[in-house]
Amino acid sequence: MKFGVGVDYSLKALLMLAERYPAAQPLQVEVIASAQNIPENYLRRLLIALKRGGLVLSQKGPSGGYLLARPPSRITMEDVVELIEGGYVPVECLEEGSNSPCRREQACAMREVWRQVRDQVTSILRGTTLEMLASKRKSALTFQI
C-alpha cells in the first residue's frame, strides 16, 4: 500500500521546478537528477510522462530543459500519482477490472472501510499542491539547524 519510487522522484523533480516558477530558463534533466539523487535515465522517462500529462513543458537545445506547464498552485499530488501510477487503490477489490478473488456482489465488512481509506488519501493528495509543498520545504530549510 505504498506509492512507487516514480511518484517520489516525479514530485522531487516537480518541486525543484515549482521553487523556480515562473522561470524563463528551463532546468536541465542532469541538474535535477544530480540535485535529487535520481537516476538520470529514469528521470527522463518520468519527465516524458509528466509532459504527456500536461504538467511540464520541455525546451530543446543546449540551454533546454523543463519548466512547469502551469502554476504550482494548480498542480496537485493527486495529478502526479494519477499520471505515474494511475490513481490510488489500497486493495485490489476496489480496482475496476481487477482479477480480485473477492466477489463484489457479496457483502464485505471491509470494502466500505477500504473505500473510506481510498477517499481520504485521495482527498489529501488532491488538496496538496506543489506550491504548498514548496512552501513547507522552504520553511523546513529555513529552520533547519
Image: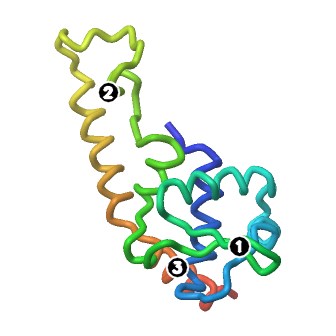
Near-viewer residue (37 or 121): 37
Q: Nearer the viewer, mark 1 or mark 3?
A: 1
Q: Residue at x 78, y 81 (%)?
A: 63
In the displayed structure, 3 sits above or below 76; it is above
Three-letter amino acid code of the residue under disc 1: Gly
N-terminal of the pair, mark 1 or mark 3, is 1
- 13 to the left or right of 114: right
Q: Residue at x 57, y 62 (%)?
A: 11
Residue 85, how many percent across, how many down? 51, 42
N-terminal of the pair, mark 2 or mark 3, is 2
Residue 105, how many percent across, how many down? 18, 10
- Location of the C terminus (image quadrant): bottom right
Three-letter amino acid code of the residue under disc 2: Leu
Q: Residue at x 74, y 50 (%)?
A: 42
Q: Nearer the viewer, mark 2 or mark 1?
A: 1
Q: Which residue is mark 1?
A: 65
Q: Which residue is mark 3?
A: 134
